[in-house]
Amino acid sequence: MLDRLLITGAAGGLGQMAREKLRPLAKTLRLSDIADMEPAKQGEEVVPCDLADAAAVRDLVAGCDGIIHFGGVSVEKPFGPILEANIIGVYNLYEAARAAGQPRIVFASSNHTIGYYTQDTYLTNDVPLRPDGLYGVSKCFGEAMASMYHDKFGQETAIVRIGSCFPEPKNHRMLSTWLSAGDFVSLINSIFAVPRLGCPIIWGVSDNDTKWWDNSAVAYLGWRPTDNSEVYRAKIDAAMAPPGRDAPDAVYQGGLFTAEPIHEE
Amino acid sequence: MLDRLLITGAAGGLGQMAREKLRPLAKTLRLSDIADMEPAKQGEEVVPCDLADAAAVRDLVAGCDGIIHFGGVSVEKPFGPILEANIIGVYNLYEAARAAGQPRIVFASSNHTIGYYTQDTYLTNDVPLRPDGLYGVSKCFGEAMASMYHDKFGQETAIVRIGSCFPEPKNHRMLSTWLSAGDFVSLINSIFAVPRLGCPIIWGVSDNDTKWWDNSAVAYLGWRPTDNSEVYRAKIDAAMAPPGRDAPDAVYQGGLFTAEPIHEE
Amino acid sequence: MLDRLLITGAAGGLGQMAREKLRPLAKTLRLSDIADMEPAKQGEEVVPCDLADAAAVRDLVAGCDGIIHFGGVSVEKPFGPILEANIIGVYNLYEAARAAGQPRIVFASSNHTIGYYTQDTYLTNDVPLRPDGLYGVSKCFGEAMASMYHDKFGQETAIVRIGSCFPEPKNHRMLSTWLSAGDFVSLINSIFAVPRLGCPIIWGVSDNDTKWWDNSAVAYLGWRPTDNSEVYRAKIDAAMAPPGRDAPDAVYQGGLFTAEPIHEE
Amino acid sequence: MLDRLLITGAAGGLGQMAREKLRPLAKTLRLSDIADMEPAKQGEEVVPCDLADAAAVRDLVAGCDGIIHFGGVSVEKPFGPILEANIIGVYNLYEAARAAGQPRIVFASSNHTIGYYTQDTYLTNDVPLRPDGLYGVSKCFGEAMASMYHDKFGQETAIVRIGSCFPEPKNHRMLSTWLSAGDFVSLINSIFAVPRLGCPIIWGVSDNDTKWWDNSAVAYLGWRPTDNSEVYRAKIDAAMAPPGRDAPDAVYQGGLFTAEPIHEE
Amino acid sequence: MLDRLLITGAAGGLGQMAREKLRPLAKTLRLSDIADMEPAKQGEEVVPCDLADAAAVRDLVAGCDGIIHFGGVSVEKPFGPILEANIIGVYNLYEAARAAGQPRIVFASSNHTIGYYTQDTYLTNDVPLRPDGLYGVSKCFGEAMASMYHDKFGQETAIVRIGSCFPEPKNHRMLSTWLSAGDFVSLINSIFAVPRLGCPIIWGVSDNDTKWWDNSAVAYLGWRPTDNSEVYRAKIDAAMAPPGRDAPDAVYQGGLFTAEPIHEE
Amino acid sequence: MLDRLLITGAAGGLGQMAREKLRPLAKTLRLSDIADMEPAKQGEEVVPCDLADAAAVRDLVAGCDGIIHFGGVSVEKPFGPILEANIIGVYNLYEAARAAGQPRIVFASSNHTIGYYTQDTYLTNDVPLRPDGLYGVSKCFGEAMASMYHDKFGQETAIVRIGSCFPEPKNHRMLSTWLSAGDFVSLINSIFAVPRLGCPIIWGVSDNDTKWWDNSAVAYLGWRPTDNSEVYRAKIDAAMAPPGRDAPDAVYQGGLFTAEPIHEE
């Protein structure tokens, strides 16, 4: 059990889910976001923070023995905000962690680092990057930063390329990318339980029938997801037509992100 | 749901099984063979056809939005009949499909395209071909034709290298190659459900304990077979001795086909 | 030195070159084509033959201890002539060779068996086939036939995927695909010199600076091409503009063949 | 069912387990060790033997149609005893088997043949060897011997790299390496049931959540382990702290063996 | 021949060399740097520019049909200047190129994107990134940006991971990493000559005897370096002792960069 | 330059060649064998030694800062002498080296560690072992020992799988396996020159046209062989017929060793 687990991006969807589900993982949860968060409950600390503020991040990280980094931009946006949160913010986080004794980090990367692979390919975790937008490029930057801090300083990071973490899959593409809350929690537990983590790239995806991603390289973590998007297929089929065979969300793993333009600021 | 699904080779074993099991997949099943078929039932059309007759095949395919191509020779035979049905017939089928708006095709290929691999090797779906007879060579031709029509025209085909599709496995080799009727049906469903099929090579085999073939490359289809030949092992052991260690059905994945001569016409 | 070397397709460009250059390889050259050939010179036999005529092919092959099979259609054509020469003809050839004591065969395959790979990929000789037309599909058939006769009967074949064998490269694509006459000859010599040939796939290409194909898997043959298309680059640059970046002969290894339609008969 | 199954090393932990569990596999179990064994029960023969004594080993093996070779040193020791039992002993065994008609052999190899791979790597069964001590080196020797007798004489051996075969896992590393008794028995059954065994390398490990080893290459054996160390995790967590991230049993697959010195005799 | 070739970083070592050697490649060379440059000669334009200034970069790129991007920080530095030049600057460059009709780009990446691989490994161009400092991380960012603009917009970039481009190798490590000026020039020529470039990763290294990097994947470019660092070995041996076997410049491909700290601003 | 280089097996063919050619590599050559050697010349020490005598080996190695280990049995023999020289002897050597400060070792391994691969396969240096006799098995043992001492103690060894090191190739198989004296010398120089050696497996073979072995993984050594067996082909062709296609020296890389029995003592 951890003493103090920092969750950044705690006001977002993933962050709120983590706040609720990861309560047993640490004596204290330190919750941070630039946006408004619900007030601290028992065993929680609420610490607003702008990730682009190096000094603030250093204070935020101090005293934590675990970090789950959901903070930053998580959709396609103009370069400015991505730069602030996902480039400068990540650098600030790693420098803060280095100053704080190198607590283990879970870095929320994304399938958008490899979004231009087609859906009929099955990816190991060492394929070359193919980001599908500025957001994806910023996550590639974060992965490179994690790798460098690991090689240079021994900082451990679990790079989790999260598929689609929602209560249930919302469309046909998510039948392949869905990560259930339960599997997310068991993944985080595995990451903090393994004696030696290293700096693995992990596909954050449930045990769906439709699969694009091969996690066998990280089988040493002992994470075995158990949920399956297939139980939602009929519901999705009833709610919407599947994408056409040449639609971006049928062609590319990154789905509609591949059709996004560069956003003007 | 399809409007009209064509099943060629409908008089054969696989064809009859498909006729019975795939009824829910389409409003109308169009059934075709050169041999006699049972009369059409409700929702069925029975259309005799010689695959070597280009005009007849064109008529047969017109109006169908899905094709399951079991037609042709399915065992080792002299070159003449293989040429007619499996070479000329396949060309006719693809030309007819091109004229008919490129309905999705399930092409029944065979493990005899790779029959000379030994049973102690585990094959991905991109291994070089090693056909075990004229029949196997003709299926290699069909796979090449499917690939070319896909690259040139966008025609989608599921190339299914069927193991042994029978009600139950009949001998020791089939413990590895058995494809149950239930898994066959779920495979066909997956092939027609996926928004973008492409032109994958799929091992048509159930979830048997003894495995020679790795389907992970087509995990995007969402097909997860559930039957297991193992439940028949005791029955087979009781019925017959296993092959000797140097017998063709113990050495080669293609089994006894590898011991077939070139058949005289 | 061979006793009698059969060269099929002897009236064609490759065949004429071989007739001239391979004279030292055998006591007698038996030259065959369906088209007119020059009369036999000293040490030559001229034997017209239709490859689709099984009995004639059997007679043609009898008494030969080496075969170079250039015969058949070598460009995109309607299916009819391809079927006659490249499908039926190849079957006839292998059956004739089997009857004649299995002389070593050089089978002229083609880069059009893999023509849909893009020019920025570097291919080993075991990549999956991607034929670019009916001609390419027929060559895939021939390769499969060679493989089967090797596995079943021990028939040895050198499958040579010839790039572009001309006196000099004629356009920008041929800077990558050019096979010089000298390198062709040294390849044939290596094929007949190696004690055990097996059934290798060989890229028939010179030591050009621009390369798409990796022959390291057949380094056991001891063939080391020495010519380089680069010496013709300036001449080609002067004679024509390079293809545009999206032109088929800039995109695909098969070049313009990929843009060919299915030819009507 | 075998006539007479020899189990060497029958006095050791694995041997005793095998003696009890494998009773149904053969009409007679021949049990051998250099140490004291319990007296023979019904259907058993107890034959003390020093593996370094060639003549004795020849007598021991004669009349057996199956061998499970657990005999020899199974921990890090001085070179002398390892040489006697694991080098000379293995040679004696293979020579004896050759004289006795080549009964199928199960050779107990070890994860210590690859002990210096780190725990965050996932190994196929064809990775280069990285032994972690003299014991591991001796097992590499045994694997090479098995391979040579297979290639030269057709002797079949199942090379089983046993993880940790105990009633239950004893520490955190064993969550990855544990092989249950039940899975051990099903493995032995599969080895003797397959018509053609060849000379495979098999990872002897249960279906644990935490995995380092990939057995897909031997899926043709039909062995599907069903036990999972995960059920013991809480018990182990309660009993001891996990190793630190830089401790040998957290870093290397071979665990503490990697920290063993060369033992003086 | 290009109309106007932009060379950024023209005041630096590489830039000056390019300015001199690439004169024949374009009618006009546009030379840019934030530092002072020599005045423009015939056929040159000298355009000072801060890469972090988006509008200035847009003006700089307008009218160019080729770009060689040497600009930015090229050694380990504090994050601030790296952010300005190598992160913001690269984004500005790609946006400017998009506005200017997508001239072909040569992006000077670095071996420091993979600097933590050890010197006894031989790298293909698709290995996972292992940057060795903030500079290396910024080059990973640039590579990801290039990939994304290629996939999304068709922008072509040659990503050149330059080893050590100096008149001659200066130390033992550079015997492996040296790129001669002559080979640099022939590489640039190849990049602009190939009809279709795509977005390849190219190891920028001469034909040295000591090699860490495999360029066979980009053999389609037709670049065949001809210089060899070996001719300087004696001179280097005479000038300095080789690094000790555990020194960073003997262990890691990135050499002393791996021993650099994070620089304070 | 080394102070004292030990050459074991100095009375053998390789040893005598090394004695002559490697004179410039060290101030003193210490030459050792169990057989008679020529008397010491200037700069030489002649030290007879039985490798199976641990104390003698320890004395032999003391004071040396480089070892070339040719000693031991180098052909197929009964197990007894192989055990003495190649098993016990190798253990003694590594223990002696450990006591002597771990001088760099060149271990003469052999192609007979992989002799059962067929001649039409092209081997990287990480293929699984396939020894072709007791001699080959003993060399596998030596390679495993070298690996273990490297991982456990940091002992560096160049494992050189020597092909056929003679003044010239003697038969057709040696066209593929020949290592010239000149290339041998340049290899040894490279091994001692590289700042960090590690424990590589190196194919000891010249730059022959006919190749079975791929040394690209050890390109970091900077060894570029320059001799080519091809210049001897005509001489060999004139002297003897090539082996038949099914003869062991045409089928297997290990040649006639694969046809050797187990030798009786």
Image: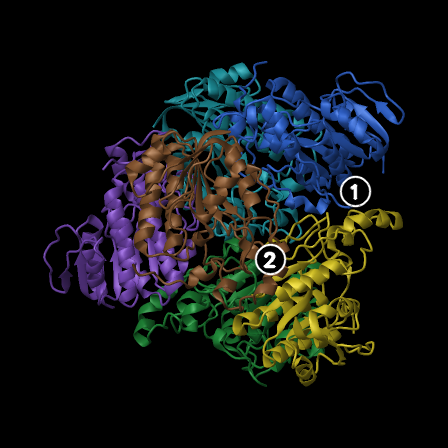
Chain colours: A blue, B brown, C purple, D yellow, E cyan, F green
E136 horizontally vs B13: left or right? right
Q: Residue at x 12, y 51 (%)?
A: C36
Question: Looking at this rendering, what residue extends furthest in the left direction?
Answer: C39
Structural crowding at the residue carrying mark 1, measured as other residues with C-alpha within 10 Å and reported as few (<14), some (14–19) or many (≥20): some
Q: Chain of mark 1?
A: A
Q: Is residue C88 left or right of residue A164?
A: left
Q: Is residue C155 above or below residue D29?
A: above
Q: Residue at x 49, y 19 (%)?
A: E96
**Between C194 and A63, the one nearer to me in the picture:** C194
Q: Amino acid at mark 2?
A: Val
Which percent across, then down, holds residue E188? Answer: 42, 34
What residue is pinned by disc 2?
D218
Q: Where is residue D226 shown, x and y percent of the image?
A: 71, 53
**Where is residue D253, by image quadrant?**
bottom right
The tag on residue A193 is 1
Q: Amino acid at mark 1?
A: Ala
Residue at image position (67%, 83%) is D54
Residue A167 in the image: x percent, y percent?
Answer: 71, 27
